[in-house]
Image: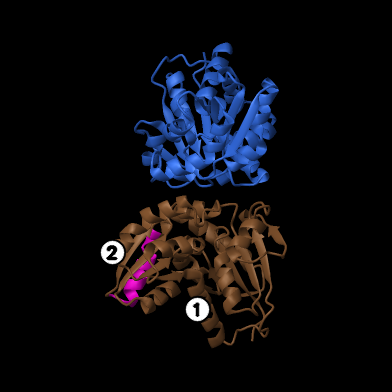
Chain colours: A blue, B brown
Amino acid sequence: MDNRAIGVFDSGLGGLTAVKQLMEVLPGEDIVYFGDTGRVPYGTRSKDTIIKYVMQDIAFLKTFNIKMIVVACGTASTVALPVVRDKFDICMTGVVDEAAVCAIEATKNNKIGVIATSATIKSDAFKKKIQTLEPNANVFSQACPLFVPLVENGHFDSEVAMLVAKEYLEPLKEAGVDTLVLGCTHYPLLRGVIQKIMGYDVTLIDVGEAASKHVKRYLEENDMLSPKKEGGKCSYFVSDSVDNFAHLGSLFLERQIGEMVNKIDIEKY
Amino acid sequence: MDNRAIGVFDSGLGGLTAVKQLMEVLPGEDIVYFGDTGRVPYGTRSKDTIIKYVMQDIAFLKTFNIKMIVVACGTASTVALPVVRDKFDICMTGVVDEAAVCAIEATKNNKIGVIATSATIKSDAFKKKIQTLEPNANVFSQACPLFVPLVENGHFDSEVAMLVAKEYLEPLKEAGVDTLVLGCTHYPLLRGVIQKIMGYDVTLIDVGEAASKHVKRYLEENDMLSPKKEGGKCSYFVSDSVDNFAHLGSLFLERQIGEMVNKIDIEKY
């Protein structure tokens, strides 16, 4: 048993979709969430900048009494995690490896689609991981740079969201993928539109859900589960104004945020 | 005569539309451009963060031999410029005041529309300035948060751009504005779409053009024009990867960027 919290961070608020999954899979665990809203988005930054930011995000979370860290950001997981993992003495899990495992389990025709930010797609991290685990898999990747701004402006199922999604997803549909990895934590909010375009026989892999299942297994295997079975608490920290957090955050979490949200200066870490 | 350069900065690459106008209006002037691509966008940040960033941007430009500074960013001009102007001993011009003058000169029915980022619209800076100069003016403001990501992803005249623009502009069209201020330096790249929706009898005010005319007048009045009549050189600095600069920058400047682009660490200033 281990009653320390789980640390979760993202470049912004998207990681809250992973927090939502964690709360469902592990309702007794306390969670400390940091959203780097002052420096969002990471997806368009250079590799050096992303690594610097991620080092600071982890250093901040480590000021709390935490037992593991979930990197709930596709860009940070793919670009920075392989580099920074060895620099800290704490277990970290990203959103790539477990999603790759889930995608391989789900596919029947070995045709797997991956959608994510430009930086994540450019890194080829999902494709490499999937093909390491299953060399016969055909992976079709597509950057969807407008999905994050669409979600952050409330376009979940509008005509505009539909039109943009069609443009991005049509090639994957034509390729005949039967499984699609939503490789960015913002994308579950477009799940309805994506499912409609891809068809209801295509399996969508939510990276936050995949990571949460991995966290549960890891904690079980290492006897690190919380003694509580439910009633886990979540603390929220952001690096810019907290004004919009409650509204937008509630959309990502799909529940009201009652707790206090605190602003910190991430450049100090 | 004064052969020092003009400093120009923006949160990203949008300010290059102002550089383009400066080059046309003052072809002999040297220009030092800084695009804070590592911390773009400013429009979604808090006031304190924007002020901190703008102080650093100005401190960096002041390391060069410059005679004035153009704040080619709507958000920085409205949120930070009034606060930081007195802290530096150099003439600074933003993109608000001159655009307000131009809008009042252009309107015949005293109905003026303003479109900009959420932060700029929230600050009411254009509206206040216009109504200070012309108390009878009716100002209709509209935030267009998706315009910047659309432009940065090459959506200049696509169906998506048209659909998004229609949603934002319809209320301004219905209000009967005869003049529309494009209050963000990205927006001139959507000029075609905006003009089509608003109608060809609506005058569009390009804030970069308005600022450039003001710079010219100021330099003339203070005998600070460059001795050169043409052949001004431009140096480019950014705070993140220079990889995309040449491509995207060329679109904003509407000409090829032949010069070297340098990356700097803006957090040091």
In magenta, the rendered stretch is: B121-135
Q: Quadrant of the C terminus of chain A?
A: top right
Instruction: Say which quarter of the image contains residue B63.
Output: bottom right
Distance of label 2 from label 1 (alpha carbons): 30 Å
**Is residue B98 shown to the viewer in this render?**
yes
Q: Where is residue A32 in the image (x, y as percent from the top left)?
A: 48, 30
Which callout, 2 or 1, points at the residue further toward the start of the chain? Answer: 2
Q: Mark 1 lies on which chain?
A: B
Q: Where is residue B31 in the image (x, y as percent from the top left)?
A: 64, 72
- Asked if badges 2 and 1 are on one and the same chain, I answer yes
**Residue A26 shown in magenta:** no
B265 lies left or right of A209: right
Q: How crowded is mark 2: few (under 14 residues within 10 Å), some or many (20 or more)?
A: some
A132 lies left or right of A214: right
**Residue B123 shown in magenta:** yes
Residue at the spot 57% in from the left edge and 27% down from the top edge: A177
> In terms of secondary structure, what is the magenta stretch mainly?
helix
B127 lies left or right of B30: left
Q: Label 1 belongs to which residue?
A: B214
Give the structural element (helix, strand or loop) at label 1: helix
Residue type at the position of mark 2: Ala
